[in-house]
């Protein structure tokens, strides 16, 4: 990886926590440093997300945002381990990913995976999982899933009507979301899912990035 923006170095040296927008493309997000694999306008850090984020110290990030990027990452578990390493305790990860029922997602040849309700619970402690339990031995890093929201498709007038009625119902809680995935998502598909995660990790003795 390569840090292009000197302000990133200055923040690291001063111990200021970073906010990162992973897979930003040329669009900037206010308050966030842009991270992308390609050198584009407004990109602050060039990084291949399939490789370690070697220029970023432990616990030096306070917030991570990623929109429609993780579906392109083959080594996702390794990346999530790196994100867990660099984010501070109680930092926030907002991840927007395509739901497996989205029919258009399969047309993109660069997509290597899709996501469902339980995808990130595979990285959660058993006591932090809902009633339906999933294995959590694939990665030692642990996250707590604070929020999940389904964003139903709205490509037609009928879709928009159904979405207005069904989406608030589906997003009431994880039990309703489980029911939706089992019973309705093939008929009324979701466009994407919004996850809010926090790392489960001890608070370091020092507050400065090291």
Image (spheres, helix red, strand yellow):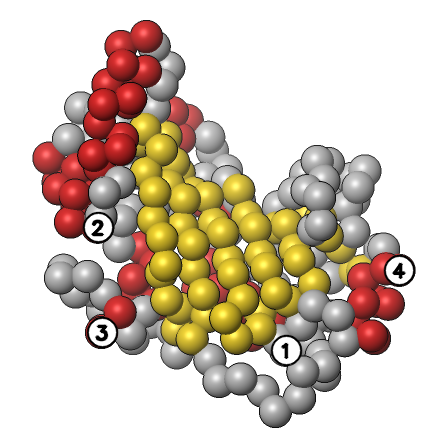
The label number, if any, that marks residue 58 in the structure image: 1
Q: Residue at label 2? A: 174
Q: Secondary structure at mark 3?
A: helix
Camera-side mark, 2 or 4: 2
| Marked residue nearer the N-terminal end (1 or 4) | 4
Q: CA distance from mark 2 to mark 1?
A: 32 Å
Q: Nearer the viewer, residue 4 or 198?
A: 198
Query: Is 175 placed above or below 151 here?
Result: below
Q: CA distance from mark 4 to mark 3?
A: 42 Å
Name the quarter where the N terminus is drawn.
bottom right
- Residue at 29% of width from left, 62% of height from top? 121
Q: Few, some or many C-alpha atoms within 10 Å of disc 3 (few <14, some 14-19, many ≥20)?
A: few
Count of numbered circles on the image: 4
Residue 31 pos. (x, y %): 71, 50
Residue 138 pos. (x, y %): 33, 71
- Residue at 29% of width from left, 74% of height from top? 125
Q: Residue at label 3? A: 127
Q: Is residue 160 visible?
A: yes
Tell me whether circle 2 and circle 4 mark residues in contact (CB < 8 Å): no
Q: Residue at label 4? A: 6
- Residue at 16% of width from left, 65% of height from top? 133
| Marked residue nearer the N-terminal end (2 or 4) | 4
| Marked residue nearer the N-terminal end (4 or 3) | 4
Query: Is 180 placed above or below 118 here?
Result: above
| Marked residue nearer the N-terminal end (2 or 1) | 1
Tell me whether circle 2 and circle 1 mark residues in contact (CB < 8 Å): no
Q: Residue furthest top?
A: 157
Q: CA distance from mark 2 to mark 4?
A: 43 Å
Q: Secondary structure at mark 4?
A: helix
């Amino acid at each position: 990886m390569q840090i292009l923006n000197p302000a990133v170095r200055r923040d690291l040296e001063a111990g200021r926590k970073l906010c990162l927008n992973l897979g930003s493309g040329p669009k900037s997000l206010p308050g966030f440093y842009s991270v992308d694999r390609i050198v584009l306008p407004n990109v602050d850090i060039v990084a291949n997300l399939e490789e370690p984020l070697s220029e970023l110290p432990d616990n030096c990030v306070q917030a991570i945002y990623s929109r429609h990027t993780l579906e392109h990452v083959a080594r996702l578990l390794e990346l999530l381990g790196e994100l867990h390493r660099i984010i501070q305790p109680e930092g926030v990860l907002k991840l927007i990913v395509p739901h497996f029922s989205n029919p258009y997602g399969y047309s993109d040849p660069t997509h290597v995976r899709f996501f469902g309700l339980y995808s990130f619970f595979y990285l959660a402690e058993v006591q932090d999982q809902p009633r339906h339990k999933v294995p959590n031995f694939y990665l030692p890093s642990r996250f707590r899933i604070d929020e999940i929201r389904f964003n139903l498709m709205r490509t037609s007038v009928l879709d928009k009507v159904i979405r207005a009625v069904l989406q608030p119902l589906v997003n009431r809680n994880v039990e309703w979301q489980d029911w939706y995935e089992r019973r309705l998502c093939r008929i009324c598909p979701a466009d994407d899912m919004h996850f809010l995660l926090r790392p489960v990790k001890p608070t370091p003795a020092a507050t400065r990035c090291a």
